Amino acid sequence: MAKVQEISVKSTTVRTMRVGDSDYICITDIARQKNPLEPNVVVGNWMRNRNTIEYLGIWESLNNPSFNPIEFEGFKQQAGLNAFTLSPSRWIEATNAVGLIAKSGRYGGTYAQRDIAFKFASWVSVEFELYLIKEFQRLKEEEQKAIGWSAKRELSKINYHIHTDAVRANLIPSEVDAYHGSLIYAEEADVLNVALFGLTAKEWREANPDKKGNMRDYATVNQLICLSNLENLNAVFLGDGITQRERLHRLNQIAIRQMSILEEVENRKLLK
């Protein structure tokens, strides 16, 4: 099932969803801007319009190899006549259209591929269209940030294995049992935690009793990038036989420099 998200446009809740590689926006929700009680009437009036039929037909011809142009021509000839009506469901069934999706149930309504949805929003209200585009872009930016965070978190986990292998090879004698070995792993993990976050895992849990997971689950993208670098560097320092005290000092200095650079780069992007 496609994940449905919501954005607020001029106090109107508009649902969106991702289907395959395309974004769809609920034009039934957009229609409430014009007629809150009967939004389907607004959608129906829009689809009676000859310009609408031509636009939908051209869009399908460019984006849908399975589109039925014969049925499209029939609708185009009738469009504009007083007796002509056309529902989204009828259009979809007759022409094999993919630009519109008619859904029933909890998330019911007519969804349109975003280009079509923006076209409909412009027909309803040019002002509303501009606000819709702005909020939709904001949603996409937030999604990209979330994807970036997940990717950096996975990278951090991969580098963590490199780090633990270095700990095992350089700090844990073969005769040490699993329990005491885990204490050494945790101690070395806290070297990184203190170098970057300024506190140990235990101190973070005590300061955040209501949060699940650990401090790394709440780290920013920049912190995760820096953490991945610190894990690799600490693995090298361990191989070089550098003491924990010296490693902590070096890693902390590196973390300060790297975070400063990463924040500066991010601020430049925001200024642009």
Image (spheres, helix red, strand yellow):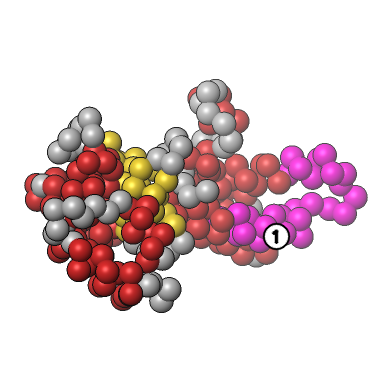
Task: Answer whether residue 184 is visible to the viewer in this image.
Answer: yes
Residue at the far front: name it: 83
Using the image, determine if residue 67 lies above or below residue 268.
below
- Judge from the rendering whether residue 141 lies leftward or rightward of residue 4; answer left or right: left
Q: Give me the residue at 87% from left, 54% from top.
A: 174
Task: Answer whether residue 148 is visible to the viewer in this image.
Answer: no
Task: Specify the quadrant of the image occupied by residue 262.
Answer: bottom left
Disc 1 marks which amino acid?
A: Ala
Q: Give me the residue at 56% from left, 56% from top.
A: 154
Q: Main secondary structure of the magenta part?
A: helix
Tell me which segment is drawn in magenta. Answer: 156-184
Where in the figure is residue 103, as x and y percent of width and height?
42, 46
Tell me, yes or no, whether the highlighted magenta stretch contains residue 88: no
Q: Secondary structure at mark 1?
A: helix
Structural crowding at the residue carrying mark 1, measured as other residues with C-alpha within 10 Å and reported as few (<14), some (14–19) or many (≥20): many
Where in the figure is residue 37, as x and y percent of width and height?
22, 30
Where in the figure is residue 165, as x and y percent of width and height?
72, 59
Q: Give me the residue at 19% from left, 43% from top.
A: 42
Quadrant location of the C terminus? bottom left
Using the image, determine if residue 28 lies above or below residue 75.
above
* Residue ID for mark 1: 166
- Judge from the rendering whether residue 98 lies leftward or rightward of residue 189; answer left or right: left
- Judge from the rendering whether residue 162 lies leftward or rightward of residue 3; answer left or right: right
Give 98 or 236, whichever is nearer the viewer: 98
Tell me, yes or no, whether the highlighted magenta stretch contains residue 174: yes
